[in-house]
Amino acid sequence: MDHELTPTAASEDAYHCYLDGLLAGDRKRCKVVVEGWLESNPDLRVLYEGLFQRSLYEVGSLWEHSRVSVATEHLATAITESMLALVYPRLLSQNHIAKSALVTCAANEYHQIGAKMTADIFEMHGWRCWFLGANTPASDLVEFIGEKHPDVVALSLSLYFNQDALFSMVKTIREAFPTVPMLLGGQGFLAGGSVRFEGIEAVRYLSSLAKLEEWIDSHGSDAH
Amino acid sequence: MDPMRTDATDAAVALSYINETAPVLAIWLDAELCIVEANALAKKLLPGGAIGRNLDQIVVDFAASLDLRDLISRPNEVHMLTMKSAAGLPETYHFRFFPLVAGTLALGSLDFAEQQRMRNEVLELNRELSNLTRQLHLANAELRELHELKNQFLGMAAHDLRKPVGIIMTYSEFVLDEAGDTLSAEHHEFIRSCLKAAQGMKVLIDDFLDISVIESGHLRLNQIRLSVGEILEGVSEMGGVLARKKKVTLVLQPADRGLRVRVDAPKLQQVLLNLVGNAIEHSQPGQTIWLAIDQRAGELVFSVRDEGQGLSTEDQQALFKAFASGRTRKTGGERSTGLGLMIARKIVEAHCGRIWVESQSGAGATFSFSIPLEAEVRALQETRP
């Protein structure tokens, strides 16, 4: 499988149109772009990474440089989250294999869209996926893992300054479940910080959704 | 106009408004950019009441790109600043800085056009959510209806197929018994194949009938108090026949045959025969199967252990669901619907029990289920909604 995103002129136009729509808070314009994108490019991972993730990283960067407000950033996230609903008819009709993943965000982490896209990628590959959403307390997570026994736990981090909370969460899970594999990812690692997790048994940082797909392919997949 | 009113009075009125009710953040900074005074709104919204903190402690600047002194030196410009808040989530304000005789007054307001856009978006999303929820409920209702129709169809079809299959089986057996001597070896084999196929079809039809009853929510138990010995009677006889056919040894290990429990005996025997039958089908000739019954902490635990090829963790997870055939092969090439273990689970759960498997690939498997003893069943049923 080709994991490289090769932007075409059309996809670049679509991306800029989508980004402009996000910054203007124009959901209808964004929806038109996504529908057009899905017609010409049915690969959902490319949509997630090439349009959703790329544009939200850009909005996040603009916010960090005081070029857009918190409200604009929140609205952009909300619009993109609502776009995921356009994908679900294609996504949730996949056949399931006997694999399950639990996907969630760290405690204090309110940006759930990265985790949601991660959950969708698992679903796309036939995995049964439990998505616990934003700001999941470690104690709730431990209880849920004990109840469902997932094959893997995926934790998403959007903000760098929540890394300490995530580290503590990972340690808590590892103490309660010595072998369950954990995957980490998200924008919160773009500036580094994944190295400190390397010493923990069976914890792996994945830098992109493409890397996540590679991991899934090597651990059982029903996709394509 | 009040003739006694002065510029100082006007200024005091304006200041009082800014301090107490204006929807703006007002903070007074000294030369070191430390907040020395703040209005009511700033005290409420900014972390720690704002006073005594330095401005750079409460401005969010991930990119470390802000030069606050430079911004303050440009009083005629509006600057977008994101501030930490007492509630924990940052908020963006549009600030202007006004130089004073001593220090600086900073006034920050929200972008009201942006607020309006957000409000409209929330209303629009709420409308869409409401419409989608309605559509979802309608679709669910249609699915429930279709599911019910499917169950009715399955039940009717299975019921109507049972009779002709029974006739095929009866007449095949009749021909073999009554006219077997007159048939050639080839014709004898033809009839035996018909009989075998019809027997397989009957198992399939019985499973479909069970599933249609279970799925439609009409599984009813006829529970009576029976001893373990009575429950095992039919199982040992039928299981023994199947085991001998496959040249497998079936060993019964009931802890206490006299122990009495309230169960629907035919259904519980169906579960046991399913587990024993599966164990036989996954065993090689010469191997042994153990059927054990133990009393443990208010439960009666039935276990069927075999020496077959065992199950992977993946197969175990899907085992008690419909059409879960797994990847292990039956040693005699036997056919199955993949519904047996699901039916077993439903019957055990209807008895307030649970069913599970312990196995490792290549090391046999132990299928177990538990039935709560009477007092516990009553307590469980009372706690059910």
Image (cartoon, helix red, strand yellow):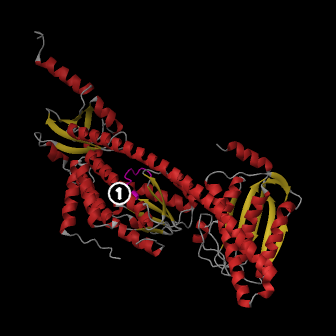
Question: Percent x, y for residue B31?
Answer: 19, 39
- The reply, left or right, for residue B94 in relation to residue B183 is left
Which residues make up the magenta segment?
A107-117
- The reply, left or right, for residue A144 in relation to residue B278 is left
Q: Which of A127 and B224 is in front in this view?
A: B224
Locate the N terminus of chain B by quadrant: top left
**Residue A116 lies within the magenta run:** yes
Residue drawn at the location 78% of the way across and 87% of the way down: B182
**Residue B260 lies within the magenta run:** no
Residue drawn at the location 38% of the way across and 62% of the way down: A90
Locate the C terminus of chain B by quadrant: top right
- The reply, left or right, for residue B229 in relation to residue B133 is right
Above or below, B22 relative to A156? above
Q: Nearer the viewer, residue B60 or B171?
A: B171
* Residue highlighted by disc 1: A160
- The reply, left or right, for residue B205 in relation to residue A36 is right
Q: Which chain carries label 1?
A: A
Could you say whether the residue bearing mark 1 is in a helix, strand or loop? Answer: helix
Residue drawn at the location 25% of the way across and 39% of the way down: B115
Q: Which of B330 and B86 is in front in this view?
A: B330
